[in-house]
Image (cartoon, helix red, strand yellow):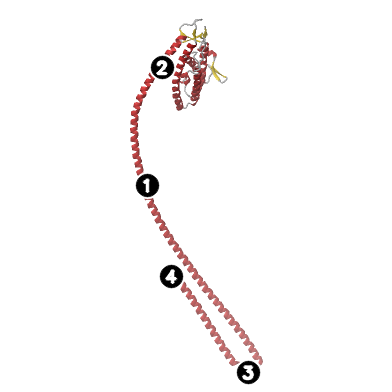
Amino acid sequence: MRKIKLREILISGTAAGLIIFGLGGDALGQRNRTRGEEQKAKQAEEAKQQPQQEQSQTPQQRNAQRREQQQQQVQQRQQRQAERQAEQQKQIQLRQQQQAEQQRAQQQQGVEAQRQQGLQNQQRNEEARRQQQVRLEQQRQQQQQTQRQTGLQNQQRVEEARRQQQVQLEQQRQQRQTQRQTGWQNQQRAEETRRQQQVQLEQQRRQQQQAQTQAWNRDRTNQRPTRGHYTRYDRYQQQQLQEQRLNVYNQRMQNLERLRDQRQRQLEQQRRQQYLQYQQRYWQRIQQDRLRLQQARYYNNYVNNYYYSRGGSYYQTSQYGAQMLQEAINRGYEEGFRSGQADRYDRWGYNPQQSYGYQDASYGYDSYYVSLEEYNHYFREGFRRGYEDGYYRQSEYGQYNNGKYSILSAIIGTILQVVQY
């Protein structure tokens, strides 16, 4: 409707301009015709009067009159020219007014068109906003529906997981019950196996004691040996003695392996890195001794012509046995020093008896010249003194020389006195 009204206004304005322009042209033409008729009538009247005036006038008067007439004609022409210029100026102004009117009409038309365009844009924007609101509402409803569905699914999954967890817990409870029953049975079997092992170990210990007692009885006496009363061994007796002491050593080694594995796990849990390294190095040395012990030498004439006392009894040994006992004290001191040093580095309490080296006390035993029991005793004598020096960072019982820790000779003399007879 607004477009139609705007179009009617523009048409009415244009028609009015054309009518005004036509009326102005007609009026101008009518005025021009009236003036021409008046001039022609005046000229005719003057032409009628001129012969009469010319007859009564002199030549001078006629010349003056003609000049006057010419001037009048010039003035008339100038006047007509001015009138035409004025008329042209009016027509120009009228056309300018018409053009200005047309421009105003066009501007009004452009403004109206812009307003109409703005209204259309506003309508489109409003429509787009309504559509966007509709889409957003649809999306919100879809999201709510999806969330409700997802929530329901999650709730179902949680419920299913809870049921499964309850089933698993029930299964675990049944498994624990079964394990307890099985564990009780295993415990009974393990207890029975342990009792059997204890019986076997007790039998082995008795056999070892018997073998050691036999060896000690040959080398030990309650009285000081006298010169000439030597114990001699032939090659066969040497072989028998070596086999007896090797069996005792191998049985000790089996127990030592179990103790080593148990101690290694305990040391790892306690994070005693320094002592763990000490134990591993000690075990490597034991393995080397084990190989050397299997390669024993036999002599044509093996004589126990030395003796020493311990605990109120006298023990016979050979020159090689005496050296071996002295080495036991010295090696025990070195291993004790390293063990005490490792406990100090790990900030562990002072306890030489709990050391792996003290409990084994067989490092360096690589022959059958003395019994393992005698070697253990003197090894531990050196070990206790070395542990004290290593733990407290002192040199009361030994010294460090050429990369080794060794016990003082004077200390060895207070521990062991070997006499040749």
Residue neighbourhood size for the residue with mark 3, other residues' Cα within 10 Å, grouped as few (<14), some (14–19), many (≥20): few
Type of the residue with mark 1: Thr
Above or below — where is 13 with respect to 46?
above
Q: Earlier in the sequence, mark 1 or mark 4?
A: 4
Name the residue nearer the viewer: 179 or 132.
Answer: 179
Residue to which mark 3 is pinned: 55
Amino acid on which the number 3 mark rests in the picture? Gln
Could you tell me which secondary element the residue under label 1 belongs to?
Answer: helix
Label pair 1/2, CB-CB below 8 angstroms = no
Residue wearing tag 1: 150
Mark 1 vs mark 2: give the one in front. Answer: 2
Tag 4: Cα neighbours inside 10 Å, few (<14), some, or many (≥20)?
few
Quadrant location of residue 73? bottom right
For the residues labelled 3 and 1, the Cα–Cα distance comes to: 132 Å
- Which is more toward the observer, 64 or 123? 123
Label drawn at residue 4: 4
Identify which residue is drawn at 35% across, 24% down. Answer: 189
Type of amino acid at the residue the image marks with label 4: Ile
- Residue receiving disc 2: 204
Disc 3 from disc 2: Cα separation: 196 Å
Q: Quadrant of the N terminus?
A: bottom left
Q: Three-letter amino acid code at disc 2?
A: Gln
213 to 89, vertically: above or below? above
Q: Quadrant of residue 79?
A: bottom right
Question: Where residue 227 sits: x, y (%)?
Answer: 51, 5
| Labels 3 and 2 touching (C-beta < 8 A) | no
Q: CA distance from mark 1 to mark 2?
A: 73 Å
